[in-house]
Image (cartoon, helix red, strand yellow):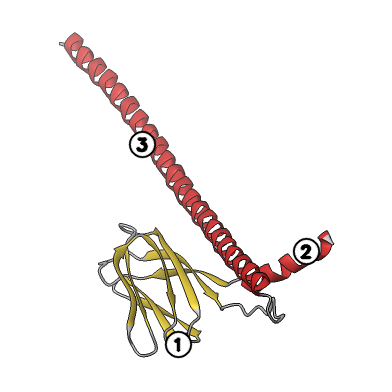
Amino acid sequence: MIANKILTLSWIILLFLKLTYGYYVVVEAHTEECFFEKLTSGTKLLLTFEVVEGGFLDIDVKITGPDQKEVYHGERESSGKTTFSAHMDGNYTLCFNNKMSTMTPKTIMFSMEVADKPKLELGTETGSDNVTARHSKLEELIAELSGTLTNVKHEQEFMEVRDRIHRSINENTNSRVVMWSCFEAFILLAMSFGQVYYLRRFFEVRRLI
């Protein structure tokens, strides 16, 4: 009995799983990179993005529909998250614009989650309103749980990227500090030897006189 319930719950969760695409893209200065996703009317799409490297870590983002209607627009954003439902069938365009940058490319990590509306045929018995209501509530809870788990997954991915970036910055800073310390030590030694040599030459000249 318990095994059947677990199997049924697993099957329902699978129906709510989202199709997720994760990408890294480098947008050069004065350029724009666009991506296309074919959606059907009523389909939801969740976009999550973050600028992980380059300049002031900002980018312009725009999403347009098949009819060129602007769905989302953001200027100089470092990170963001937006969800929208397709208002018509066709290709939706996602563009990252780095034309504001003079020479610095930007590295962007983003993901697109396409979630189709699940079609569950539960509680089909005639007059079983209570069963249907319970099933509907269960569907809502599972959908909410699925969305929360997906958000946690992406937050972990973004934190991993931030950790790699910060570790790289720390290692780079540490190497520069070590190199600068070695350079300072070399300069101090050179100045010390120079002063000793100058004083010795000075007293040798005085003694000859």
Residue type, label 3: Trp
Of the numbered discs 2 and 3, the one sitting upstream in the chain is 2
Query: Residue 180's mark?
Result: 3
The residue closer to the viewer here, 196 or 49, is 49
Residue at x-position 59% and y-position 60% = 145
Q: Is residue 20 above or below residue 186?
A: below
Residue type, label 1: Asn
Q: CA distance from mark 1 to mark 2?
A: 40 Å
Q: Residue furthest left?
A: 209
Residue 8 locus on image (x, y percent) = 75, 68
Specify the quadrant that holds the N terminus. bottom right
Query: Residue 91's mark?
Result: 1
Residue 172 locus on image (x, y percent) = 43, 45
User: Contact, CB < 8 Å: mark 3 with mark 1?
Assistant: no
Of the numbered discs 3 and 1, the one sitting upstream in the chain is 1
Residue type, label 2: Lys
Residue 198 locus on image (x, y percent) = 23, 21
Is residue 84 toward the left or the right of residue 77 in the image? right
| Residue under label 2 | 5
The residue closer to the viewer here, 2 or 127, is 127
Residue at x-position 54% and y-position 59% = 148
Instruction: Provide the secondary structure element on which disc 3 rests.
Output: helix
The crowding category of the residue bearing disc 2, from other C-alpha atoms within 10 Å (few below 14, some 14 to 19, many at least 20), is few
Specify the quadrant that holds the C terminus. top left
Q: Nearer the viewer, mark 1 or mark 2?
A: 2
Q: CA distance from mark 2 to mark 3?
A: 65 Å
